Image (cartoon, coloured by chain):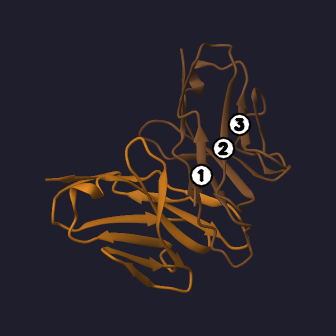
Amino acid sequence: SQQGEEDPQALSIQEGENATMNCSYKTSINNLQWYRQNSGRGLVHLILIRSNEREKHSGRLRVTLDTSKKSSSLLITASRAADTASYFCATRMDSNYQLIWGAGTKLIIKP
Amino acid sequence: NAGVMQNPRHLVRRRGQEARLRCSPVKGHSHVYWYRQLPEEGLKFMVYLQKENIIDESGMPKERFSAEFPKEGPSILRIQQVVRGDSAAYFCASSPVPGTGNTGELFFGEGSRLTVL
C-alpha cells in the first residue's frame, strides 16, 4: 500500500526560483528517500535521510525530516530547466525491506 | 559498472499473447523488485525476489502474472494472455542484501513499456 503522500501534485515555477515539495507518511520509519524520474525514464535516487536526522544537504538539494509530524520536505534551490521531472518520496519502515512510495510531485521549471 | 538493465524497452503485444520482461540487476545485487507504473501515476509494487526465491509477491495478480529470479541469468516478469489493462511501464530495481549495513536504496532500470493492442 502507498503510505507516502506528496504535495503539491504539480508545481510550476520559473527557472532560478526555489522549489519545495512535501511528503507525509503514516508509520514509523527507518529512513526516507527521495527519487527523481525524468519523463520516460527510470527513477534515480537523490538523497536519503535517516529517522534520527533532521536535515541533510546534497548540492542544491535540502531535505528535512520531522518525525513528530511524520513529514519531510525536499527543497531544490536555484532551479534549472533540467530539474523538470517527477519527484517521489519513499519510506523504509523499521525492520522492513520494503520501500513505500508516494504518488509523486510533478515539477515543471519554466525557462 | 553497468546499472540495472531491462529489456525490451518497448514491447507491443496483442490481446491473449504473452509478454516476457527481463531484468539484469546491478552486478553483485541479489535482490530484485518489480514495479508497475501507469502514466502520470506513482509506482505500484508487484513482487520482490532474491535469487531462486520469491520473498513477497503480494502486489502481483495471482492469475496470468509470474516472476522468477534464477540462480543464473536475469529476473523475468511474465504476463500470460495479456489484456489491454496490462499496458503500463514495468520497472525493475535492485539492491544489495538488506540489513547488511546498506540503507535500502534502490537502483532502477529504464523500464519496459508494454502496449497491448
* Chain represented in orange: A
Left or right, A59 with respect to A100, comes to left
Which image quadrant is residue A22 in? bottom left
For badge 2, the amino acid type reads Cys
Circle 2 residue: B23
For badge 1, the amino acid type reads Val
Left or right, A30 with respect to B117, comes to right
Residue at the spot 27% in from the left edge and 56% down from the top edge? A82
Contact check, label 2 and label 3, Cβ < 8 Å: yes
Q: Colour of chain B?
A: brown
Q: In terms of secondary structure, where does tag 3 sit?
A: strand
- Is the residue marked by circle 2 packed among few (<14), some (14-19), or many (20+) residues within 10 Å? many
Give percent across and percent down for residue B97.
74, 67
Q: Which numbered disc, 2 or 1, marks the residue that appears first in the sequence?
A: 1
Contact check, label 2 and label 1, Cβ < 8 Å: yes
Q: How many angstroms separate mark 2 from mark 3 (CA)? A: 8 Å
For badge 3, the amino acid type reads Leu
Residue at the spot 70% in from the left edge and 53% down from the top edge? B32
Residue at the spot 53% in from the left edge and 34% down from the top edge? B9
Viewer-nearest residue: A28 or B54: B54
Q: Which numbered disc, 2 or 3, marks the residue that appears first in the sequence?
A: 2
Q: Nearer the viewer, mark 1 or mark 3?
A: 1
Circle 3 residue: B77
Q: How many angstroms separate mark 2 from mark 1 (CA)? A: 7 Å
**Of the numbered discs in the image, which one, if any, rests on residue B4?**
1
Give percent across and percent down for residue B77.
71, 36
